[in-house]
Image: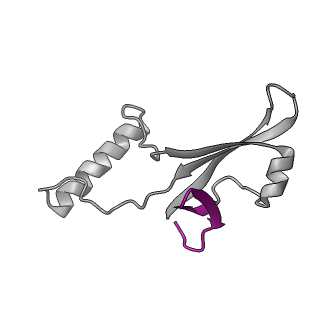
Amino acid sequence: MTKVKVYRISSTNDPESGRPGKQIELVEVRQKGVQPAFPGMGEDEARMVRNILGQFQALGLFPQVREMVLPKITLFLSEEEYDMLGITFEVNEVFDLVIREGTFSLKKSTEGV
């Protein structure tokens, strides 16, 4: 089982028929492990370095660290297929993706991320 998050929902048209539909992008959600930012440094020194780096980032000298996005599944569904699926997707909503014996299933996640 893999946790996925709804990253983007876009309206789209079928290129052949011109019928309206939706593009739903699901990305993998991974738990971030707690790792020391500066191994070998004491707590006070590491805090001082983090503060200095934060000040440089605030000045725009270093880019902000962005969330890592790992694309997992992109669905292209007609309006009819979207309705038949029976799931109303919302951006940032988390699902459990189960892949078993040639099938995919999505269930709303009950655990927090």
> For residue 85, which quarter of the picture?
bottom right
Q: Is residue 107 magenta?
A: yes
The furthest residue to the bottom: 110
| Total labels drawn | 0
The furthest residue to the front: 101
Q: Is residue 58 above or below residue 91?
A: above
> For residue 97, which quarter of the picture?
bottom right
Image position of 71 (left or right of 84): left
Q: Position of residue 88 (x, y in %)?
A: 77, 58
Foreground residue among 71 and 56:
71
Foreground residue among 47 and 37:
37
Image position of 7 (left or right of 39): right
Q: Give the residue at x 33% y 62%.
A: 33
Q: Give the residue at x 79% y 25%.
A: 15
Magenta highlight range: 94-113
Image position of 56 (left or right of 22): left
The secondary structure that most of the magenta stretch takes on is: strand
Q: Position of residue 103 (x, y in %)?
A: 60, 58
Q: Is residue 110 magenta?
A: yes
Q: Is residue 73 above or below residue 2?
A: above
Foreground residue among 67 and 49:
67
Q: Position of residue 83 (x, y in %)?
A: 84, 54
The furthest residue to the top: 16
